[in-house]
């Protein structure tokens, strides 16, 4: 069996036209197809990198996943592109052996993966009543965990000096309080700061939010100084979560050694793919750090994440996007169902779902 073709599909997703969903299809000489997805978020050149890799791996044995990954990684290809290829190769490996991907990772630790909702607030203005109402609607739909952004909706959330005005700090606390009061203590709540603040502002915000029993504060300071992140993490009682922009075990090594976070959030479509996410989770396990994978793009990345989440002992929960484009499920042969805030791990070979290419054609980003 050899790799005979690699095709890339740019598809209009939730973030289009800022960036597309980027799907990868690897075909083999005996007619197997594997699907992957690469996270193109704020990265240019991912599609181009996929095209170069695609030409390079034609003729290779698709079952040599680790060897191909090592070559691509050492040659310096874009890690989102390498991730997309690796996910497709793992799909082929599972299909070839007629077993789900989680069985290639040591088998299931669970049959359902709990998710948290990002974007429950979509369509609401940044006022207490509207956020509270949207949060309650998500809870009524069965979700048990929610995440809200606190930097983007407020005037000083993107200030160049990385501080919050006293009014905006109070505004932020009022918004978190409104959501917490609406959903009650039985629902988990996280906030995302997108690396907006300096150390003092981050610590002050964390102190003000301590009464609201947050699951985590995400990226209170930028991710490019893990010593600063570590300082914040060590000086607040609220768990700090980071890692959505980090690539591979090598970048997570520094995070663990510096104790820069109490929860990590690697992204399967960016950090290096399925095996890399599993390896990063294993590193986290020895530090007793739970894993909450980042998942902001399309359905292939979601189901690849679900496969890894099924197999790792130290899973916290997986991100899930509410308010996505209506064709998100239509492009799959088996739509991903979320029931009671959980995704059932698919039992089919490989990823357990396939892209419907005839439907995909209707949503190409060209
Ligand atoms: Mg984030």
Image (cartoon, grey):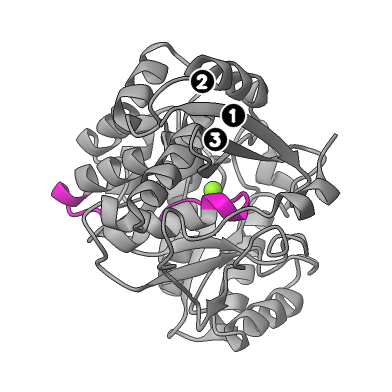
Q: Where residue 267 sits: x, y (%)?
A: 46, 44
For marks 3 and 2, give the CA distance. Answer: 9 Å
Q: Which residues are magenta?
A: 285-301
**Along the polypeptide, which appears first: circle 3 or circle 2?**
3
Local crowd size for mark 2, using a 10 Å CA cut-off: few (<14), some (14–19), many (≥20): some
**Residue placed under numbered mark 2 in the picture:** 58
Residue farthest to the front, as pictured: 30
For marks 3 and 1, give the CA distance. Answer: 5 Å
Q: Is residue 87 magenta?
A: no
Q: Where residue 307 sits: x, y (%)?
A: 39, 57
Q: Where residue 205 sits: x, y (%)?
A: 50, 55
* Disc 3 C-beta below 8 A from ligand 1: no
**Along the polypeptide, which appears first: circle 2 or circle 1?**
1
Camera-side residue of 337 and 89: 89
Q: Tell me whether the residue at label 2 lies in contact with that at label 1, contact meaning CB atoms closer than 8 angstroms.
A: yes
**Residue placed under numbered mark 1 in the picture:** 6
Camera-side residue of 29 and 193: 29
| Label ID, residue 338 | none
| Label ID, residue 26 | 3
Q: Is residue 291 magenta?
A: yes
Q: Where residue 125 sits: x, y (%)?
A: 80, 67
């Amino acid at each position: 069996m050899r790799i005979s073709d690699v095709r890339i599909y740019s598809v209009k997703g939730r973030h289009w036209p800022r960036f597309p969903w980027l799907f990868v299809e690897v075909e083999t000489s005996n007619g197997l197809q594997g699907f992957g997805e690469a996270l193109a978020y704020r990265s240019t050149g991912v599609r181009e990198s996929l095209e170069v890799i695609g030409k390079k791996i034609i003729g290779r044995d698709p079952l040599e996943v680790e060897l191909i990954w090592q070559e691509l990684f050492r040659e310096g290809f874009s890690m989102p592109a390498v991730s997309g290829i690796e996910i497709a190769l793992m799909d082929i490996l599972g299909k070839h052996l007629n077993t789900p991907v989680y069985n290639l990772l040591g088998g299931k630790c669970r049959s359902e993966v709990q998710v948290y909702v990002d974007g429950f607030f979509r369509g609401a203005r940044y006022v207490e009543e509207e956020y509270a109402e949207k949060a309650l609607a998500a809870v009524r739909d069965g979700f048990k965990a929610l995440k809200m952004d606190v930097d983007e909706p407020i005037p000083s959330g993107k200030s160049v000096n990385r501080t919050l005005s006293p009014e905006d700090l109070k505004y932020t606390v009022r918004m978190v309080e409104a959501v917490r009061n609406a959903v009650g203590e039985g629902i988990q709540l996280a906030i995302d700061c997108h690396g907006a603040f300096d150390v003092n502002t981050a610590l002050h915000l964390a102190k003000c939010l301590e009464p609201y029993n947050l699951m985590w504060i995400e990226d209170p300071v930028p991710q490019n100084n893990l010593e600063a992140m570590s300082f914040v993490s060590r000086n607040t009682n609220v768990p700090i979560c980071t890692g959505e922009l980090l690539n591979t075990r090598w970048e997570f090594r520094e995070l663990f050694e510096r104790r820069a976070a109490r929860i990590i959030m690697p992204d399967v479509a960016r950090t290096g793919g399925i095996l890399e996410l599993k390896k990063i989770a294993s590193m986290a396990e020895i530090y007793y750090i739970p894993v909450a994978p980042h998942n902001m793009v399309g359905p292939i990345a979601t189901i690849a994440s679900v496969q890894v989440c099924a197999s790792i002992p130290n899973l916290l929960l997986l991100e899930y996007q509410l308010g996505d484009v209506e064709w998100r499920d239509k492009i799959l042969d088996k739509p991903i169902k979320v029931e009671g805030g959980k995704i059932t791990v698919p039992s089919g070979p490989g990823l357990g779902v396939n892209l419907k290419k005839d439907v995909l054609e209707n949503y190409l980003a060209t």
